[in-house]
């Protein structure tokens, strides 16, 4: 891949991620299943608030071959209302406790940007912190992740759910996000976090064409030397371009997931686990270093 005249030939070489002092094998792509303990997430089928809904959703994902469950209780879709920390905890802790009780072997990521919520879920048995604000909302979250030696998902975003759609002015979206993430990584490593996963934040302060430019330039982010997570499942970059609804966007999602894995993405964060696992199986991707 050439970028500004420079040929990038680096192959992403991440072999392992440390989770709870155990090595998690990254020599093949991993599938992260989305469960939202919210009444307002943009894709209705991802919502699960009642205990029986949560158990059924996790059980299906487990049977379909999921590697990690990503559990969230505060919607971050464009325009979403910010709930209180108390409400977020009241939603997330019972759901996490239930999943850990029924499926103790599953790795659980928690989608939160609050340091106190992060600390409470890690104490309750969560494994990974997924922060859509990259520490901008609450930088103390880095110290919490470091304290528990938890992997941290660093996502690029600007503003908040109310303002992000107006903050997509870039001269070159891929280069500016690369520089932003590079600076963030320096600060995060200074806090003591060892294991970082990069999420480019598709749909967060990016318009449709910028989202597609990012995925076209995906190999550029090899330069960060951390595993890459792709979160495009059923998003507006797909359904608006195709003039369909999120419920009709599985085929478009599958196409972009296939493209991302062909460019060596390490994680797919998805609503549809079975279909994502099928992509991985058909491509027979193996990232073992020779």
Image (cartoon, rainbow, N blue to C red):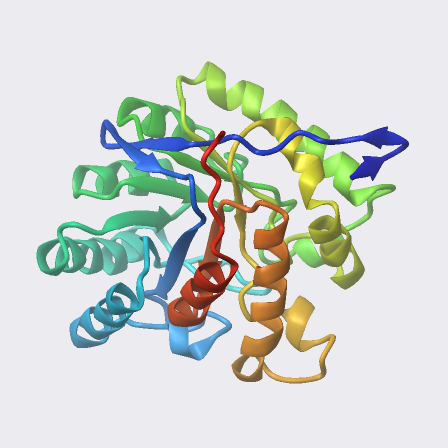
Q: Is residue 67 left or right of residue 187?
A: left
Position in image of residue 199 (x %, y %): 55, 44
Position in image of residue 255 (x %, y %): 62, 68
Give the vertical position of 176 relative to 273 (above or below): above
* Furthest-right residue in this view: 5
Residue at 72 percent across and 56 percent down: it is: 211
Q: Is residue 131 left or right of residue 94?
A: right
Q: Nearer the viewer, residue 137 or 50?
A: 50
Residue at 21 percent across and 54 percent down: it is: 96
Residue at 54 percent across and 63 percent down: it is: 77
Give the vertical position of 269 relative to 55 (above or below): above
Position in image of residue 244 (x %, y %): 65, 84
* Furthest-top residue in this view: 190
Q: Is residue 21 left or right of residue 254?
A: left
* Furthest-left residue in this view: 101
Give the vertical position of 258 relative to 242 (above or below): above
Position in image of residue 207 (x %, y %): 75, 59
For the N terminus, the quadrant is top right
Q: Nearer the viewer, residue 126 or 285?
A: 285
The total of numbered circles placed on residues is 0
Q: Is residue 235 visible?
A: no
Residue at 35 percent across and 59 percent down: it is: 73
Q: Nearer the viewer, residue 131 or 105?
A: 105
Q: Is residue 230 visible?
A: yes
Q: Is residue 228 left or right of residue 89?
A: right
């Amino acid at each position: 891949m050439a970028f500004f005249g420079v040929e990038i030939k680096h192959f992403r070489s991440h072999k392992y991620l440390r989770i709870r002092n155990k090595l998690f094998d990254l020599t093949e792509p991993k599938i992260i299943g989305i469960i939202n303990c919210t009444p307002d997430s943009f894709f209705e089928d991802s919502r699960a608030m009642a205990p029986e809904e949560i158990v059924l959703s996790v059980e299906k994902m487990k049977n379909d071959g999921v590697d990690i469950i990503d559990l969230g209780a505060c919607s971050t879709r464009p325009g979403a209302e910010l709930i209180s920390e108390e409400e977020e905890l009241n939603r997330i802790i019972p759901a996490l406790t239930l999943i850990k009780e029924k499926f103790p072997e599953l790795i659980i990521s928690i989608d939160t940007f609050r340091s106190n919520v992060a600390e409470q879920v890690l104490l309750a048995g969560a494994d990974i912190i997924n922060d859509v604000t990259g520490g901008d909302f609450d930088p103390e979250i880095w110290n919490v992740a470091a304290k528990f030696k938890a992997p941290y998902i660093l996502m690029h975003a600007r503003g908040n759910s109310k303002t992000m759609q107006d903050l997509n002015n870039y001269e070159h979206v891929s280069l500016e996000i690369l520089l932003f993430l590079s600076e963030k990584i320096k600060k995060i490593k200074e806090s003591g976090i060892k294991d970082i996963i990069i999420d480019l934040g598709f749909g967060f302060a990016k318009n449709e064409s910028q989202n597609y430019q990012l995925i076209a330039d995906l190999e550029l982010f090899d330069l960060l030397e951390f595993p890459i997570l792709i979160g495009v499942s059923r998003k507006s970059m797909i359904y608006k371009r195709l003039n369909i609804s999120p419920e009709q966007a599985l085929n478009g999602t599958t196409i972009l997931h296939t493209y991302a894995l062909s460019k060596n993405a390490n994680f797919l964060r998805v609503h549809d686990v079975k279909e994502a696992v099928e992509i991985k199986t058909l491509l027979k991707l193996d990232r073992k270093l020779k």
